[in-house]
Amino acid sequence: MSGHDAVGRRVFVVGAGAAALFAGGAVSGAEAAVVDGPLPDFHPALKDGLTFPLAWGHSPIHDIRAWRRAARAKVEEHLLVPRPDGTPYAAELAEGPQGDGYGRELVTLSLTPYERVRGVLLTPHGTGPFPAVLLLHDHGAKFDIGKEKLVRPWYDDTRLASAQAWADKYFSGRFVGDELARRGYVVLCLDALGWADRGPLVYDQQQALASNFYNLGSSLAGLMAREDTRAAGFLAGLDRVDARRVAAVGFSMGAYRAWQTAALSDDIAAAVSVGWMTGLKEMMVPGNNTLRGQSAYYMLHPGLARHLDFPDVASIAAPRPMFFLNGGLDRLFPADGVRVAHAKLRAVWRSCHAEERLRLQTWPDLGHVFTAPMQDEVSDWLDSAL
């Protein structure tokens, strides 16, 4: 056999089968299987290869401000969606009926050059400028409602029953956005692509949607990140809003969106993430929902894990005030992953001499929910942080 032929033969020997062959053993079907989730049979080796070399404490950059700039640039590089900063918002507002202590408007605006997005804008009665909350909805495998999960849909009776059922299931029957507006916050909540006015998707369509973005040289998760940062800029730029007091708040996928937006936007002064923080390796275990694909594509930036873990990305927001809450019985985010993430977050805020601005809280008897007592604690924290 020539050297060329040997190389040609070797490239077809992969995975556990390769290890068995080079050890002199037979290659069985089981050794070449896709296992647990499905995960490739060699997934432990892939995990071991993730050392997160740009993470604070691992990075060769030892100045925290320089590290934040470098880490943000690395995330930006992996979004695959150009910055749409030059796109005019061209907002159109349509006034709705008054709420209990606040006004309601439908808003339509351009977050990117590609399409117009509809959302809701709530404004407290009184004299502004007011503090504000960019409120980010969850995934939940429920696509008929998006913004309506968090703000009572006065404009669509057909969605009200679905929205109320969602609020009853996860939010103690409350509409979180309406509660915040009653407490004096301007609230902006928009549909992400696939939900409500921008859908609805069918659950099994998510992978196809994501792969089509990749085929087009773009990214579903990158689009969501860009849209959320643009939404933060729009909210901060409103005359009725105090631009120094804008927070991002979200539950579940919305929690991911909240800390991601804080990491990528200087318009966010504080963030609250309810039910989404973990270490990547601890999440990539048999039985975790992420392994099913589908919803994971909204939070998947290809290649970023070669550089940064989830808490590393969230830490780009340091030393701004951040509040991370999780339920101790939340099966989506096992306790070991939460502990790993919290330790990383603490280390960054400590390096910024701002430990008092980071709050990490576990509700031991709760699952994947954002209950009324949790909401009250978040509102009190926002009042002090902003």
Image (cartoon, helix red, strand yellow):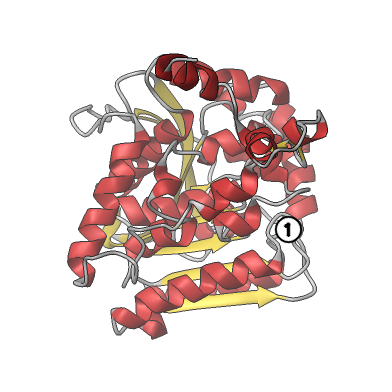
Q: Secondary structure at mark 1?
A: loop
Residue drawn at x 38%, y 36% as measured from the top left: 227
Front residue of 153/72: it is 72
The amino acid sitting under disc 1 is: His
Q: Tell me, yes or no, if residue 265 can be seen here.
A: no
| Residue 124 percent location from the top left of the image | 44, 57
| Residue 135 percent location from the top left of the image | 49, 50
Residue drawn at x 49%, y 63% as measured from the top left: 272
Residue drawn at x 41%, y 44% as measured from the top left: 304
Task: Count how many numbered circles sit on residues in the image.
Answer: 1
| Residue 336 percent location from the top left of the image | 66, 69
| Residue 216 percent location from the top left of the image | 40, 14
Residue at which label 1 appears: 368
Residue drawn at x 29%, y 60% as measured from the top left: 129
Q: Is residue 235 left or right of residue 85?
A: right
Q: Residue furthest front?
A: 1
Q: Is residue 383 left or right of residue 320?
A: right
Q: Is residue 223 above or below residue 287?
A: above
Q: Is residue 269 above or below residue 186?
A: below
Q: Is residue 22 above or below residue 240?
A: above
Front residue of 185/305: it is 305
Q: Is residue 185 left or right of residue 77?
A: right
Res 274 → quadrant: bottom right
